[in-house]
Structures are given as structure tokens and as C-alpha cells.
Image (spheres, coloured by chain):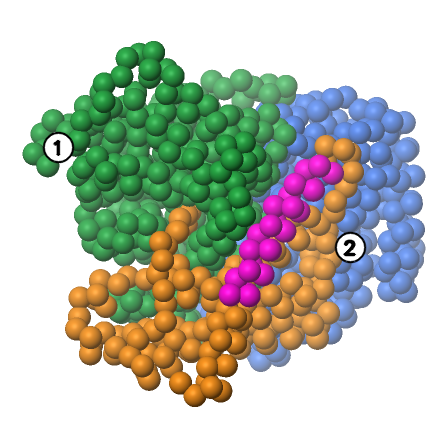
Amino acid sequence: MEEIQLIALFLFVLFLFLGTGVWVGLALLGVAFFGIEMFTARPAGDTMITTIWSSSSSWTLTALPLFIWMGEILFRTRLSEDMFRGLSPWMARLPGGLVHTNIVGCTIFAAVSGSSAATLTTVGKMSIPELRKRNYPETLVIGTLAGAATLGLMIPPSLTLIVYGVTINESITKLFMAGILPGLFLAFLFMGYVALYSKFSSKFAPADEPKLTFAEKVRNSRFLIPVLVLIAVVIGSMYMGVATATEAAAFGVVGSLILAASQKSLNWETFSQSLMGATRTSAMIALILAGASFLSLSMGFTGLPRGLADLIASLDLSRFELLMVLLVFYIILGCFLDGISSVVLTMAVVEPMIRQAGIDLIWFGIFIVVVVEMAQITPPIGFNLFVLQGMTHHEMNFIAKAAIPMFLIMVVMVFVLIFVPDLATYLPDNMRQGPGGGV
Amino acid sequence: EKWDMPMAYSGSNFHSATGAEFAKCITTGTGGAIEVVTHPSGSLFKGGDIKRAIQTGQAPIGERLLSGHQNENAVFGVDSIPFLATSFDDAGKLWKAAKPTMEKILADQNLVLLYSVPWPPQGLYFKKEVNSVADMKGIKFRSYNNATARLAELTGMLPVTIEAAEISQAFATGVAESMVSSGSTGYDRKVWESLTHFYEVDAWLPRNYIMVNKDVWNDTSDANKNVIRGCAELAEYAGTWRAVEYTQFTLNGLKAGGMTVGPAGDALTGELKDIGATMTEEWLKAAGPDGAAIIESYKSMQ
Amino acid sequence: MIPALKKVRSFLDMIYLASGIVASLFLIAILTLILVQMLARWTGEVFPGAPDYAGYCMAAASFFAFAHALNRGAHIRVSILINAVGPKMRRILETWCFAIGAGLAWYFAYYAVKATYWSWKFHEVSQGQDATAIWIPQLAMVIGSVIFAIALLDHLIHVLFSGDHRITTDIVEQSHGE
Ligand code: NA
Ligand code: NA
């Protein structure tokens, strides 16, 4: 019961701050302050600085501004339109037309980026204006983008999977492998939805695309080459062991600068604009992450997340029931916390439950990622919603509504994972063993 | 009264299990007057923040790797001098020799030392058979502090800095090819996916320690202090026993994973002992009279 | 506006922009550090502490940019209510938001100064290979958060006396979270 009261209070303060328009990062900071002052004997100010300094000066964060910068450079050059031009001839004749460029673009970019919102920004910046120009339904454009961008978390590299793997002592390579097929399958589900929407919705009436011959399409695809080269460099450097994720991000920046220069779209103006843009954007995220890290600490002190997990553990559920309860639990948590925080905060209690129930931990990592992906698009705190809000100037509730079908598709994805666990476990179980061999 | 206890390592780690029992012991022993709540996996404070958090009263009690503080004072690194104390017995003696000094240094920092449990002995991981220091030349070696970087330098390996979180990936991608760590690290990270040999050189046995804020400690009743001391003694004993058991368990795990596990050859062992002597000298220079006193006291126990 | 106030105005605006530019230089420093570390590794050289330095640059890039990002409308907020109400209510809401924001930011800045002062007094040293005296990188947190707090207070005063804040939302280039 104590938990319920705590939740109610936390939620009240959070809604009060967020609802009245206090900046998200500061609102999280305020709620965290409130939680510590009200419910614990700990010194709020000192703990705040300790945890925020530690999280904001973390080396692992440095991949973040670099990947954002890379996106900013690509955005300010011709490269992003080129990618759209290269993909669109192939997508134009699919049912649903160019909306598929959202999904395919996100899938491709997810393979270079460990984050969902970076994927969203890069793809969205090029696809939103083009799709609007062609009169595609705005809700479909925004919704698919919000949903497909979450693939950034599942298709390797993935920040969430790294955090999960470290917390639970599982092989990160295996987790990365496990994310590939479910990621592609989820992209396929999104595309299926777009196809159905285009057939059954009266709102779907985009402008006609010029018909191209096969040869012309192939010729247009040359525009894809720079992007693919860049992806090959970034991914390749990681998988060949030349670079870590952060270093691959640095490659990405340098690579995109070189490509921009070779296209003659690199000048002082685009360079400084991309740099300042990346600085502002990463500061925006840094403020939210700072607030979130303090909120995590505050919740840790109040014992709320653990209390909830204990409550679930005490119910003595079957494996399926447990997964359903966890699904609901993480969806609720995901409304208010970022994915990484909810993984770190709860894993101490959830991990033993999962092990006890005999659930494969690699598989569960992918389960968690889908659920965390959902959290990206659920209000009031969903990073993809914030990002889209900034990009499109739509209201939060419009974007959240547009994303509901994608949310439901991800729920379907959870059940697919439960009933076809091989989707996640096939690749890691059959991947090429290292020289050590063994299991 | 609720004592939040931040711990850096995952809940399933034996240090965390020991800490959880220690917490339970206090809660029961004090009749609930002091309820200790552990927060493993760095879920409250990250490893590097724990000592300062306790010093400044942000958390009353917590656990940290002792040698994590050796930048601050070289004496904290006494348990991590390569090839000085190379068995559980010797590590126990070294700790006995160092304990009074540690207690004093920590007391000056507003901390009270409760107990300390060693990690399993540190061995060398490689991607190939290694029979001498010459075989190590040019290998990319994971270093995580100045001592391990120095070890790389003295063995002719190339130190590369890899965060703990990235160990598996670094080995899988060849960014690193070797490391010095306990069998448990390799077992937890499933390094047999990329590495082939583990040499039980028992280079050193690093320790975790549990500390409590001095002001909090002084405000605790004598009866409860006695309960806590008793629980600490039990925990140190149980934790050390776990470390011994766990050592064998993880070595078996590495073998089952397909790795070649065994002691280093005589030639390699001899060369490593020399490197150990060099590093002990260097440590003594950095640690000053406090350090010299510890080593002297330790040698006298042999 | 009286000339003295005008001077304060342009001085503050200059500070916000300058700190934003400093932040962007730290972003370049992150890139440089990572590239140099990679080069070092390939050539068999050692660059101890590079990840730690990159981490400090990350913190500096964030804290120095907070105020600039605020002025350019980059920080995210839920503006459903603010956009829905009339001008009078809007002014009250904005006052509340900037008061809360400025209050929290000054609270943060105060404790950032305190923590950094103690790091300096205790000679606190980084636990990484860099072994940096930690108050040096923490200075970035102090300066950045004080400027951020000043900026929020600046807007609050503006809302109180002239009815609206001075945040200009150009094409907000926001992205990523996780
Ligand atoms: Na990804
Ligand atoms: Na959410």
C-alpha cells in the first residue's frame, strides 16, 4: 500500500511539473528532489551532484554527441536527400509508397546508431519534408517514424543492450546477434501496417510518383552509395575490431565530413551550424539524462521500483503470466522513465525472477528491448515523442496518438517473441564460435 | 532506521551475496532498529562515487574495491602489487598487516572500516599459448589503472584502456587480446568466445571493503555496534570462504567453456616474479613509510 | 531601455552565446581525443586516460551549452497547456515555469559549487588512469550551471516585467535521447 501512495505522489508532482510546461530535465530534477526530501533522510543536494556529475562525465556518453553531430552534418548536406532519392524509387510502388522510406531508412540507420532518437532525427529530417510535399497523411508519417526509429535500440549497436548485458553479466556479442532478426521482423511488421493502411484508409492519397524504368532506378540508387559506404565504415570498423562504438561514432563524423566535402556541400556555414546544432541537441538530452539519473537515485532511495518488483515476485506466477505482468509493469514504468534507467533500476530484482522461471536471459534481453522501445513512444515521457515534437512542432498528444498503432504492433511483437523464441535465440545459438569454441 | 548500502557489483556476484547476508544479519540482530538495504549493480551510486558518498553522509554504508582509491593514496593499492601475496593465506596475512593503517587512513576520512573480502586470484588471459614474457610482446593488453598499465609496459604488451562494460566486445572484436583478472571475470563475461588460455599465476588478490560513515557509526548504540561488528566478522569469514569456493567453480567453468586452464610454466613464473619485485619497489617509493611498515609487517609473518 | 540596462542585456547575451561556443569546442575536443586515442592504439603508442578526458569534455560540452540551448528553444517542454490558455493565464504559467526552473537551477548551481569546493579541499583525485584533480573538470559544471541559472532568472525577470520570455525557437534541431 505504501508503494501505491508513493506512486500517486510521484505521479502527481511529475504531472504537475510536466503538465504546466516545466522543461522535462528540470521537471525530473524537481520530482527527484521532492522524493528525496519527502521520503528519505538523505541530503538531496549532495547526492544530486554526485550522481549527476558521475553520469554526465561518463565516457560511454560521448558516442551520443558524435552520432548526433554525424546526423547534423548529413542533414545539412545533400547526403540525406540522396538517401531518400536512392530509396524512394524502390519504395514508390510498394503499397503505402514512400512511407516505407521511413521504415527502411530507420532500419538502415539503426545499424549505425545505438540510439532510437538519433535514428529518428537523421531519418526524420530528410523524410518528413519530402513526404509532406507529396501529401502523405501526417499521422502515418509521424507514427511510422516514431515507431521505426525505436529499431535503433534493437538492431545492433544498441546502448540499451549494452547496459542490459553488463547488468546481468551476459555476452553483449550474443545480445547484439539476438537483436538482428527481431529487429528486421519488427520493421517488416511496420511495413505491413503501412501497406494495410494504404489499402483501407480514405486519407491515403499521396501525389503520384513519376514512373521509372528498372535501369533508372538502379541509376538513382547510386545516391545510396555514399550512405552505404558510411554505414559500412561505421559498422565495419566496429565488427572488424578496429573501433569501439564511440570510436565508430568518431569515424562517422569524420566520414560524413569527408563525404560532405567531396560533394562540395561543406563550408564554414554548414560546418558551424552542424556543430552548434549538435551542441544544443546533446545539451538538451544531457539535461534530461541528468534529471533522469537523479530521479533514478531518488527512486532507489525510496525503494519504490524494488518494492514493485518484490510485489510481483510474491504473486507466484506461471512463466507466461510473469511475462505478462512484467510487460505491463515495464510499460507503466516506461511511461515515466527512460529505458536504461528502468533496466538498471529493476534488474536486481527481476533477474533472479527470470532465472528462477527458467527464462533464457538473452531472449529476455530482446523482450526488454521491445518493451523499452514502447516506452520511447508512450507519454508523458517518451524520448521519441519529445524529439518529434521538436522536429515537427506538433503537440505531444497528436504525436502520441499517431504512434498508437506502432505501440500496438510492438505489443504484437512481444507475443511473436513469446511464441517464436527462436527469432531471438537462433542467431546467437548458431553464431560462429570464437577460437575458444564451446558454448 | 534505514541504512541504504550502495554496492558496485551485480546482485548475483558473491560479494553482493555476502553483503546481502551481512545486511540481513544486522537487520535481524538489531531487532529491526537498523534496517540495511543493499543496492547492488551500482544502482544507487556507481563504484567510483561510493566512497565519497559515504564520507559525506550521502549514504551511511557501502562497499567499494579498495584499490580503486590508489590514485588518492598508494597505500590503498597494497592488495594489488603483482606477485607479492599469491594465495588466499598470504592475502589474508597481507590484509592483517595492512588493516591498522587502512583503519587509520579511513578514520581520517570520516570512515569506519567494517570488513573486507578478497576477489579470487588474478590470472592472465590470452588468445594463444604463452610460455615466457617474450611471448607477450606486442599483445594488446586490457589495462584499467596505472598499475595494470605498468604491468603491460614491463611485459612488453600494449596497454589498451577498456571499460569493464566493454570487455566482452573488446575481446570479440580484437580491440584487446589479453587481460589480467580473476577467473570469475572471464566466467561472467564468457570470454571463451574469444580467448583460449587462462594462466593461474595468482598475481594478486584484490579486496572489496565495507565502510560506514563515522558520524553515523558514532550515533549508533554500543549494543548495535557490537551486533554490526559480529555480523561483519561473520561476513568476512563467509565471504572469504565463498571466494575460495568460487575460484574453483569459475576455473571449472572456463574449462567447460573450452579454455586451457592451468598454472604458468616455470620460465614464465620466474620472469613474472622479477616483474613483481620491480613493482613492489616502485609501490614502496609511492606509498612512503606507511607502505614500508605494511610490507615489513607482512614479511615478518611469513 | 536605460543605457546601463542595455549594457547588461548585451553583456548577458554575449555570455550565453560564448558559453555555447565553448561547449561546441569541447565537442570538437571529444572527437579529437577519440581520434588521437585510436591513432595511438594503431601505432602502438599509449594515451592513458583518454576516455576519462573525453568524459570530462562531455560534461563540459553539456553544462556550457545549457543556457544557450535554453535561449534557442532546444530544451524540451510539454507546451499543451501553455499554448491553450489565454495571454493572462499564459503569463502566470510562464512565471511559474521560470520560477521553478530558476529555483532548481540555482539550487543545482549552489550544490555544484559546494561539491567542487570540497573536491578541491579534499584533493579528490579521479580514480581512472588520468588521476586528474577532479575539481578542475568540475569547474565546467560550476560555470555552466551558474550561467544556466542566470539565464533562467533572466527570463523570469523578463516575464515578470515585460510579459514574455526571450526564447527564440528557430528550427529546433533536436534529436536523440536513448
Ligand atoms: Na542500433
Ligand atoms: Na514513455
Q: Amino acid at mark 2?
A: Gly
Q: Which chain is blue?
A: B
Q: Residue at x 42, y 78 (%)?
A: C153
Q: Colour of chain C?
A: orange
Numbered range of the magenta stretch: C17-40
Q: Residue at x 54, y 48 (%)?
A: A268
Label 2, residues with CA under 10 Å away: few <14, some 14-19, many ≥20: many
Chain of the residue under the numbered disc 2 shown in the image = B
Q: Which mark is residue B77?
A: 2
**Quadrant occupied by the C terminus of chain A:** top right
**What residue would you read off at disc 1?**
A205
**Quadrant occupied by the N terminus of chain A:** bottom left
Q: Colour of chain A?
A: green
Badge 1 element:
loop
Chain of the residue under the numbered disc 1 shown in the image = A
Badge 2 element:
helix
Q: Nearer the viewer, residue B63 or A91?
A: A91
Q: In the image, which is nearer the foreground, mark 2 or mark 1?
A: 1
Q: Can you see residue A59?
A: yes
Q: Is residue C33 magenta?
A: yes
Q: Real-space Cα distance between discs 2 and 1? A: 70 Å
